[in-house]
Image (cartoon, helix red, strand yellow):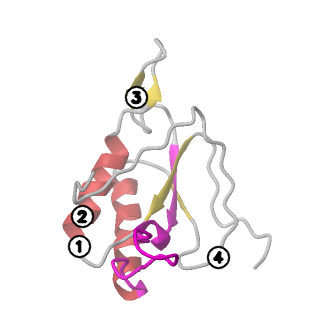
């Protein structure tokens, strides 16, 4: 329903998660472990040295298949490497479950929905993660 907030956090990470056609359970495990333990929050000395849990933060997990968009050719991005819902949704939910097992609070966007997402990007710090290590 328009205007309804389905997920909200204060301090933490807004994770835009895209699942590819070649992703599986192992990819979900790798990416959840990386998200949970990535040391990108400031410590007392101002260095990026704390994980989201150490900083007392939470996760806002948002499905975002368009991250698999390939716009290298032509004017219209191709999404052929993005997994369809029947494959993507279980892996998206699995990442959330694995993050919860790390004692993190996890809020969700609405899978597959058109959403208005608001965030305050401190820093700004934006990190790209890929379980296939393509970058």
- Residue at position x 34%, y 68% from top? 94
Image position of 15 with respect to 19: above or below: above
Of circles 3 and 1, the one toward us is: 1
Dot 3, how many residues are within 10 Å of its Cα: few (below 14), some (14-19), or many (20+)?
some
Q: Is residue 72 magenta?
A: yes
Real-space CA distance between mark 2 and mark 4, rounded to the nearest whole angstrom: 25 Å
Of circles 2 and 3, the one toward us is: 2
In the image, residue 126 lies at what x, y percent?
A: 48, 43
Mark 2–mark 1 contact, CB under 8 Å? yes
Real-space CA distance between mark 2 and mark 1, rounded to the nearest whole angstrom: 5 Å
State the mark number for residue 50: 3
Of circles 3 and 4, the one toward us is: 4
**Residue sitting farthest toward the right:** 3
Asked which quadrant contains residue 18, the reply is: bottom left
In the image, residue 23 lies at what x, y percent?
A: 25, 72
Asked which quadrant contains residue 68, the reply is: bottom left
- Residue at position x 41%, y 78% from top? 89
In the image, residue 115 lies at what x, y percent?
A: 66, 70
Mark 2–mark 4 contact, CB under 8 Å? no
**Residue sitting farthest toward the front:** 74
Q: Which stretch appears magenta?
A: 58-85
State the mark number for residue 27: 2
Real-space CA distance between mark 3 and mark 1, rounded to the nearest whole angstrom: 28 Å
State the mark number for residue 84: none
Which circle's residue, 2 or 3, is located before the other in the chain? 2
């Amino acid at each position: 329903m328009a205007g309804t907030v389905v997920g909200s956090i204060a301090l933490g990470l807004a994770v835009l998660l895209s699942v590819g056609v070649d992703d599986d359970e192992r990819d979900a495990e790798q990416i959840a472990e990386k998200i949970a333990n990535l040391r990108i929050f400031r410590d007392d000395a101002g260095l990026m040295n704390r994980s989201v849990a150490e900083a007392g933060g939470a996760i806002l997990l948002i499905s975002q298949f368009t991250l698999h968009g390939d716009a290298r050719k032509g004017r219209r991005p191709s999404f052929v490497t993005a997994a369809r819902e029947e494959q993507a949704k279980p892996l998206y939910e699995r990442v959330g479950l694995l993050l919860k097992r790390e004692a993190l609070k996890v809020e969700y966007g609405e899978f597959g929905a058109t959403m208005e997402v608001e965030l305050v990007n401190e820093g700004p710090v934006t990190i790209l993660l890929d379980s296939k290590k393509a970058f």
